[in-house]
Image (cartoon, grey):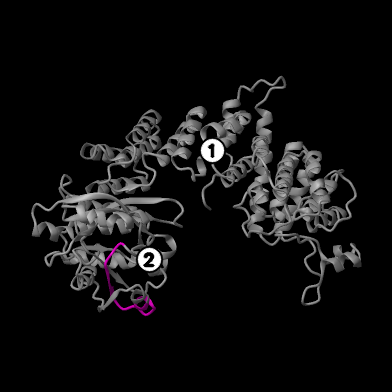
Amino acid sequence: MQAERISLCMIVKDEEELLPHCLASVQGAVDEIIVVDTGSSDRSAEIAQQYGAVVVRFEWCEDFAAARNAGLERASGDWILFLDADEALDRAAREQIRSWTTVSGCDGLFLNIHNYTGTGQQGGTVNPVLRLFRNAPEHRFEGRIHEQIAAAICRRNSEAAFHVTDMVIHHYGYQTAIVERKDKVNRNVRLLQQAVEEEPDQPFHHYNLGVEYLRVGKAKRALETFGMARMGIDPAVTSYAHLLFKYEVRCLQHLNRWQEALDRIDAALELFPEYTDLMHHRGVCADALGDADRAEYSLREAVRMGPPPPIYHTEEGIGTYQTWHTLGRLLEGRADLEGAVDAYVEAVRAKSSLLPPLYRIFRIMRVSGQEHQIPELVRERFALSSEGATHKVLGILEQSRCYDAALQLLSGISSQPSAEMRERLSVAEAMLQIQQGRWNKARLKLEPVQRKKGLLAISSARWLERLEWIEGKKVNGDDPLTLWLKRGSQLGAVTNEEPAVQTGRMAGLRATKKKDTDSGMDGTVAGAEYDGWQALGLMMEGCVQSGRWKELHSLIQMCRQQLAGAGLSVEQSVRMGEKEKEMEGKKENGKVSDIDSFPGASDTLTGTSWLVKGLISAADHHLEVFAQHADGQRHRCWPVVQHIRLELPGADGFEN
């Protein structure tokens, strides 16, 4: 059977940044490209021509359908595929599209649009949209914005058939940076308001206007607009009715009108019983209303249903990882920690790159006294198929303060490591020992690395200086952070009987600029280094674990002074002697430089973060002690203490 020809039709304006990716994604999948340029002032037209496109100049008239139809007039293919410049055809779809058009007896084919929002890393939504249809003179778009083709196809053939395929289009246009740069929301609202004025009885315009209001957080106005749309449709035959109901529910949730949202969901489920998104939100609403039993039942029902059929718009992870994670949070609130861990495990198994459930698993097991079971759980329930995946888990264990579990996993990270990798693993283990206040064990790992004078020798030497300092021994090295703390104690910043904690840069390498987002474990193995604040956090943690409360208090005080900008005065610096002043250098204006500086000292945001982590660690430790009787039995207040400890702020795997 002869393959039918496919024409790609697009409209663009100032899309030189995104257009190459789009056009590259269709190479080999289409026979011709028609690009309607509505007034670009950049290289969009030139780029399109480089990909073999026919460029049609079109004077923009505030009408997307008119622009699309200008492209259809020039298309000669048997089928029309239409894309926007901020979209890309999935690789699998590129290979499948000709098979679909060759064997399909349909008038149109739906492709799944994967919409990425925010930074593009949080997942997105999946929406089946008619994007491939037979070319015919009668098939022309309608609608000033959110233009549609289905109505014209059905008018030409009242028995027109459509099919939902598994082909995917990736849509990046609603990522935050792109939306802000192109001012999409304001443009859409303006055109939709104009469309509503021209066709006030068209519910689709009201629906789309409500979507834009909801997008910018105007939930009350969006709800009113959705209500106008709902009054004008027959839900049984309107393709977007299921989504209209869900968006109304989301508006009510934003407005904390939880009972109304629940009632709306129950009514919608009568019409769309297979729509998993509604069942998921039913659980969320029931939880907000305090009905934990109904919430758990609804969420478990949602995971039983799985993702909805492809005819429905859905959010990525509904019925799988997103629902499992929501269920885990619910079970945590019910103090069913074992059930919560199981739910989080299922979330990670459904999406291996998902980090928040891992943080909750490890934190729950640590707080409930089951940290020793973590290595076995990781080996049995997760497939750590690469060294990188193991490093990621180790980093999360470190941030969750599961140091013993990390050490157990670390020992089996590589069966035959290279000499360089052995050194990296030694430094990584030393950092874990430091965070537990096991100074001697850390020293035993760092000293061989220093002696071999390899890539990590300098950083190991600096950490050895800090260990000398914290144990009250004389320090003669040149580690900037050690010198900073030494000066502080000599000038009276530290008034305890024992010397204050010494910390500094972790691994001597600057392979990355990341700071607070990279865990120490992950950074050490990968070759990154701690800056000063992160190193201070490591040592604060070690003080907590080893019970060096005087040192911890002194360190906290010095950090607070640094963050407050107090530092050391010039008069104080004179007392340090001319030689030490010279080591600190001079500012351009001839004054002594900020002598209380250390690597990363100027980053007050990171400094505050690590100081808070130190305080939380101390609070967590005291709660743990309180929860134990002298004979090792749990205190009668253990459930309350455990709940408090689980709710303490900490790393959670979500982007900042």
Residue range in magenta is 29-46
Residue at left 49%, top 35%?
A: 345
Q: Residue furthest front?
A: 1
Query: Residue 386: x percent and y percent?
Result: 56, 44
CA gap between label 1 and label 2 equals 41 Å
Residue at left 39%, top 55%?
A: 116
The relative height of residue 70 versus residue 455 in the rendered view (above or below) is below
| Disc assigned to residue 195 | none
In this orientation, does residue 621 appear?
yes
Amino acid of disc 1: Arg
In this orientation, does residue 37 appear?
no
Foreground: disc 1 or disc 2: 2
Pick whichever, 354 or 232, lies toward us.
Answer: 354
Amino acid of disc 2: Ala
Query: Residue 637: x percent and y percent?
Result: 60, 25
Question: Which residue is disc 1 drawn over?
Answer: 360
Q: Earlier in the sequence, mark 1 or mark 2?
A: 2
| Secondary structure under the numbered disc 1 in the rendered image | helix
Residue 653 among magenta residues: no
> Which quarter shows the N terminus?
bottom left
| Secondary structure under the numbered disc 2 in the rendered image | helix
Residue 35 occupies quadrant: bottom left
The relative height of residue 37 versus residue 479 in the rendered view (above or below) is below
Question: Which residue is disc 2 drawn over?
Answer: 24
Residue 634 occupies quadrant: top right
